[in-house]
Amino acid sequence: MRGGKRPGAGKKKGSKHARTLLWEQFGRVVLSEGIAKALEELNKLKGEKYLYHFEKFLQYFKPRNLDIGLSIEEPELSDSELDEKIKSLLKHYEQRS
């Protein structure tokens, strides 16, 4: 065939280069370890600090779908009030997914 590739030669449409696959695998490993460490640190926090960082953590997973309207400027919450807020956030998050 003149001036081009023969049909079926080369990389298939939609296939990924081995280097791309390696980077994706590396990214999954780094994220899984990072998320585990982040959750450890998140669980050490209490009250408003926990709520603030929990909200940031959720924004990582669904940045466009997360509009919870919660602010760190709220008064200090008791543990039960904080649990209710978190349940409300998770319910809102699940509904938008």
Image: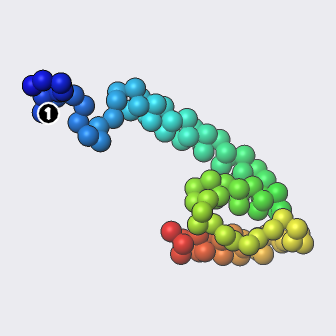
Residue 87 appearing in the image: no
Q: Position of residue 81 (x, y in %)?
A: 78, 75
Taking the spot 40% from the left edge, 26% from the top edge, the residue there is 19
Residue 57, located in which quarter of the rendered image?
bottom right
Q: Amino acid at mark 1?
A: Gly
Front-most of 3 and 10? 3
Taking the spot 71% from the left edge, 61% from the top edge, the residue there is 55
Residue 57 appearing in the image: yes
Front-most of 56 and 41? 56
**Rendered view: 40 above or below 20:** below
Taking the spot 62% from the left edge, 53% from the top edge, the residue there is 60
Q: Position of residue 9 (x, y in %)?
A: 16, 28
What colouring style does the render use?
A: rainbow
Q: Position of residue 32 (x, y in %)?
A: 54, 41
**Rendered view: 71 above or below 38:** below
Residue position for label 1: 8
